[in-house]
Image (cartoon, rainbow, N blue to C red):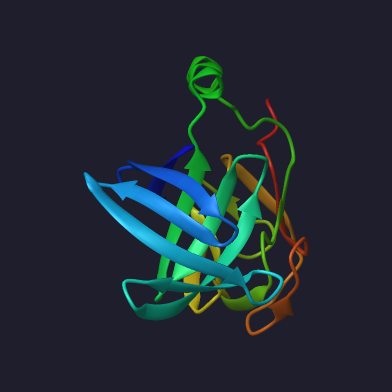
Amino acid sequence: MNYEISEKGGEPEVVGLKELAEGHYELELDGKTIHVDAVKSGPTIYSIIEDGRQFEAMVDEKGAHGFDVLIAGQLLHLEAVDERTKLLAGSAATIAEGKQVIEAEMPGKVVKVSVAVGATVAEGEGVLILEAMKMENEIPSPIAGLVTELGVSEGQTVEGGALLFVVEPPEDD
């Protein structure tokens, strides 16, 4: 199976992954073959040995084909490459419309809230910063509009699925 790997906002690279036996994998990356032993040591934590080096990776599933992986302070997004799905995704861009309810994708701590209820935000504008897995992630507004609800405050700890904020599109005059 091939996967596309990229750091958030970075260019994707294709990685081949073949399971040789339970917990033993072969990766093909940049023309190199890497042998890896991986054992699940917690609900989202894997203990990995690669070339005699041991480290841990935190894995958070993102839908049917994607994963966010935190390794040594580096957050990667992995997505399965399926040519049919890739073609369909390319031909049908998702457009966020209407009221948008933004929830935490994983547990974390709200480090900063950049706007107040009633503020107008642009599409892609950062609304708050959520620290998760020792990484600070800016949570942007998916649409231009009005922030009608903030479900969190600075310093608050949240669980995955917790309401962060609500943005509604501007009313047409």
Q: Position of residue 25 (x, y in %)?
A: 47, 55
Lateral position of residue 17 relative to residue 153, left or right: left
Q: Who is closer to the viewer here, 133 or 148?
A: 133
Q: Who is closer to the viewer here, 41 or 102?
A: 41
Lateral position of residue 30 relative to residue 141, left or right: left
Q: Quadrant of the C terminus?
A: top right
Residue at the image point whose x is 63% and y is 80% from the top: 154
Above or below residue 32? Residue 2 is: above
Lateral position of residue 138 relative to residue 156, left or right: left
Residue at the image point whose x is 52% and y is 49% from the top: 19
Above or below residue 54? Residue 50 is: above
Residue at the image point whose x is 48% and y is 32% from the top: 81
Q: Who is closer to the viewer here, 148 or 24?
A: 24
Q: Identify the residue at the far left of this view.
A: 31
Above or below residue 62? Residue 110 is: below
Q: Is residue 162 visible?
A: yes
Q: Position of residue 82 (x, y in %)?
A: 52, 27
Residue at the image point whose x is 47% and y is 52% from the top: 77
Q: Is residue 139 visible?
A: no
